[in-house]
Image: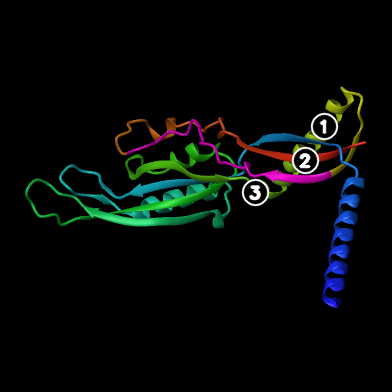
Amino acid sequence: MNRLIKTLTMSTLMLATAFVGNAQTMEKPLVKKIEVNGSAEQEVLPDEIYVSISLREYFKDKDNKNKIDIMVLEKQLQKAVEEAGIPKENFSIGAINGYREWWGKKKPTTFLETKNYILKVSNLYKIDGIVSKVEEKGVAGINIDRYEFSKIEQLRRDIKIKALQAAKEKAKYLLEGIGEQLGEAIEITEIDNGYTPQPVYSNMMMRSAKMEMAADAMPESTIDVQKIKVRYEMKAVFKIK
């Protein structure tokens, strides 16, 4: 008998609890909300451009004589960099390699060295003038190794804020169109589609030992690299008053 009373009591308590919970759920008002996406983007010029310059030893004469040493070429390049007003710490060696010249069936006896240099500049305007002061045949090639924007983190923050502001503005005018008012933000989500480096283009010429253009005829470039585009999208949920 006591067991039956206890069972009935527990069942009654469970039913009462379920009833109260359902009542609370039914009484909770539904939140009217609006979900929107906002985006923002900006283009900036890279202010840290890393240019790769390759120099190589060569022979002045066809009979494998009068070799121009790599140190001669390096000193020419280093002097040109200094005269251009570029800090010493922005000029460094990137790689060193070498090879032997084969002439017919004869065993190669002469070793020719190649050095690769990395020059950090804020723009490309002086590159052509710098390279033109190095022996023409000693310049194996030039290319842009990489490029960066020194204040990229600050730029990312600014664009994310603008994207969120755009989302809020969108929600506001959409609600005004149906006679509703915008409330506070409920949820904010960052959509990860931000910074992707773009290809770099410039009028900087690829130079090689086969070029016949005179060094003093090489003009300085006046065309800069392509801009970096940074874009972000933000998703926001707002209450409707």
- Picture coordinates of residue 94, whole percent (x, y): 43, 55
Do the numbered discs 2 and 3 sit on residues whose CB atoms are within 8 Å?
A: no
Q: Residue at x 60, y 41 (%)?
A: 46
- Report the mark closest to the observer, 1 or 3: 1
- Picture coordinates of residue 185, whole percent (x, y): 85, 43
Do the numbered discs 1 and 3 sit on residues whose CB atoms are within 8 Å?
A: no
Residue 193 in the magenta stretch? The answer is yes
Q: Amino acid at mark 1?
A: Ala
- Picture coordinates of residue 205, whole percent (x, y): 43, 33
Instruction: Please tell me how many numbered marks the rendered image carries.
Output: 3
Q: Can residue 138 be seen from the camera position used here?
A: yes
Residue at disc 3, secondary structure? loop
Q: Can residue 84 be seen from the camera position used here?
A: no
Mark 1 and mark 3: Cα distance apart in space: 34 Å
Residue, disc 2: 236
Instruction: Quarter of the image for the C terminus: give it.
Output: top right
Mark 2 and mark 1: Cα distance apart in space: 9 Å
Q: Amino acid at mark 3?
A: Ser
Q: Is residue 89 above or below residue 194?
A: below
Mark 2 and mark 3: Cα distance apart in space: 30 Å
Which label number is shown at residue 150? 3
- Packing grade of label 2 (10 A; few <14, some 14-19, many >=20) is many
Q: Amino acid at mark 2?
A: Ala
The dominant secondary structure in magenta is: loop
Residue at disc 1, secondary structure? helix
Q: Is residue 191 left or right of residue 96?
A: right
Instruction: Quarter of the image for the N terminus: give it.
Output: bottom right
Q: Which residues are magenta?
A: 186-208
Which label number is shown at residue 171? 1
- Picture coordinates of residue 208, whole percent (x, y): 34, 38
Q: Decide which of tag 2 and tag 3 comes sooner along the chain.
A: 3
Do the numbered discs 2 and 1 sit on residues whose CB atoms are within 8 Å?
A: yes
